[in-house]
Amino acid sequence: MAHVQFGPQQPEVEEDLVNWDEVPDEELEETAFERFEGLKEMFPAPVRSAVTTTVQLTWVVAQNSFSFARSAAWVLSTSALLMVMPYIVDKELHDVEKAQLKQQQQLLLGGRPS
């Protein structure tokens, strides 16, 4: 009868085992991704889930806030332009009429320009 082993397989050669506590830190090279992945072992799943949910919610709120701010800026600027533009045009016409009237009075009276 054959011997059946369940669970992770152990290396057959003891030489393949490395005691990582004895390896100097200078010889260990970890990428930033590996270090980030290692944090999974440090924090329990509920904490990771809460952080993930918080980050996702913050991102959605930021996107919606930006979209709202952009729309509000468009509405306010176009409304202000539509409210102020008639006043500016009317004032310009009034100033032109006033200048023409003054010029006509100077020509009719032969007065000096003032």
Image (cartoon, rainbow, N blue to C red):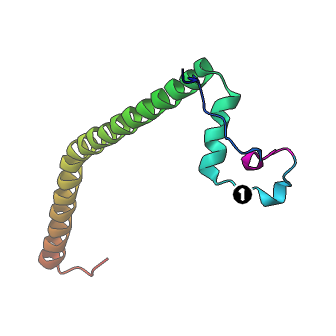
Residue 82: x percent and y percent?
20, 44
| Residue 18 painted magenta | yes
Seen in the picture, residue 113 relative to 68 is either above or below; the reply is below
Image coordinates of residue 20 in percent, x first then y, are 80, 46
Secondary structure beneath dot 1 equals: loop
Q: Quadrant of the C terminus?
A: bottom left
Within the magenta stretch, is there residue 66?
Answer: no
Name the residue at 60% across, 29% down. Answer: 8
Q: Amino acid at mark 1?
A: Glu
Q: Residues within 10 Å of mark 1 (few under 14, many from 20)?
A: few
Residue plotted at (15% across, 69% down): 100
Farthest residue to the top: give it.
46
| 89 on left or right of 56 | left
Identified at 87% across, 48% down, the residue is 22
Where's the N terminus, which quadrant? top right
Image coordinates for residue 38, horizontal then vertical, percent: 66, 39
Classify 98 as above or below 73: below
Magenta-colored span: 15-21
Between 73 and 59, the one nearer to me in the picture: 59
Question: Could you say which quadrant of the image residue 21 lies in?
Answer: top right
Q: Position of residue 99 (x, y in %)?
A: 20, 68
Q: Which residue is mark 1?
A: 29
> Which residue occupies the foreground of this view, 96 or 77?
77
Occupied quadrant, residue 35: top right
39 to 86, vertically: above or below: above
Q: Does 50 appear above or below 67?
A: above
